Amino acid sequence: MSHLTHEPIDIQALLALDRYADCGGLALFVGTVRNHHQGRSVASLSYTAYVPLASKRIAEIEADACRRFGLSYCRVVHRLGQLRVGEAAIACVARAGHRVEAFDACRHVVDEVKHQAPIWKEEHYTDGSSAYVEGCCIRPDAHRDTCNGDHP
Amino acid sequence: MKLSFEFYGELIPLSAGHERLTLMVSSAPATVADALLLLAEHLPALQSGLDRCAVVDDTDILLRSDPVPESGHLVLLPPVAGG
């Protein structure tokens, strides 16, 4: 399964329940499209990505999480294209021996993907206007911390 | 020399909807920073956003002091907001 897809995310396929008998913990996070942002009514979102680097960064984040948290399995899939309210935008599965590592890893991985993978979110509002959500600068030689507060 | 730029995210509306721009330059810019100066001269609307952009050659993020790749192609990535 690709890290980036224009098709609805197949959550069941991500779980890998038929493997990893050593794992007693499975954490699943699914981020869905919300109908509001900063007081504005959101009708839909459009996600775009620079796919070569986004795929590479997500794979690196997964591998790092496996080492850091001792996971047997970690998988992230991010949706691209136009999504309606309620649709899944990102899914992350972490499998570990115990629940604590799985929960911690899942949260860490989603944060890293949101802040490092070159993916952009354009909000389409119910009044017909649209705007890109302000995000995190990934320029390595930036002069300051340019990660903004509205993309937690 | 042909110098080409590829835009993503909020850079696209700033460049009037264009996802790519090619400039023909008489002398090659020495560094990524020099290439961005040429871009800003050509598209002043982009100037405000360039400082927060990562500049990429394929999957390698470049520093401003790095030389422009031989391909002359630079991908500009504004602040990211997935999830």
Image (cartoon, rainbow, N blue to C red):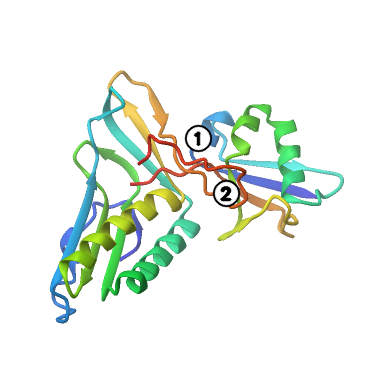
Task: Estimate the x, y position of residue B33 in percent, counting from the top left.
Answer: 73, 45
Q: Residue at x 72, y 58 (%)?
A: B69
Report in which chain the residue with disc 2 lies. Answer: A
Q: Residue at x 66, y 54 (%)?
A: B63
Task: Give the crowd class for mark 1: few <14, some 14-19, many >=20 residues within 10 Å.
Answer: many
Q: Residue at x 48, y 39 (%)?
A: B9
Q: Quadrant of residue A112?
A: bottom left
The residue under label 1 is B10
The residue under label 2 is A139
Give, as a three-letter code, the residue at label 1: Glu
Q: Secondary structure at mark 1?
A: loop
Q: Quadrant of residue A143?
A: top right
Asked whether the viewer can see residue A14, the reply is: no
Task: Estimate the x, y position of residue A73 in percent, counting from the top left.
Answer: 26, 72
Report in which chain the residue with disc 1 lies. Answer: B
Q: Residue furthest bottom?
A: A22
Left or right of B65 in this view: A112: left
Task: Give the crowd class for mark 2: few <14, some 14-19, many >=20 residues within 10 Å.
Answer: many
A20 versus A139 height, above or below? below
Left or right of A58 in this view: B73: right
CB atoms at circles 2 and 1 under 8 Å apart? no
| Of marks 2 and 1, the one in the foreground | 2
Q: Which mark is residue A39?
A: none
Task: Estimate the x, y position of residue A60 in percent, counting from the top left.
Answer: 43, 66
Task: Estimate the x, y position of residue B82 in percent, counting from the top left.
Answer: 38, 46
Q: Residue furthest top?
A: A127
Q: Residue furthest right?
A: B26
Give, as a three-letter code, the residue at label 2: Arg
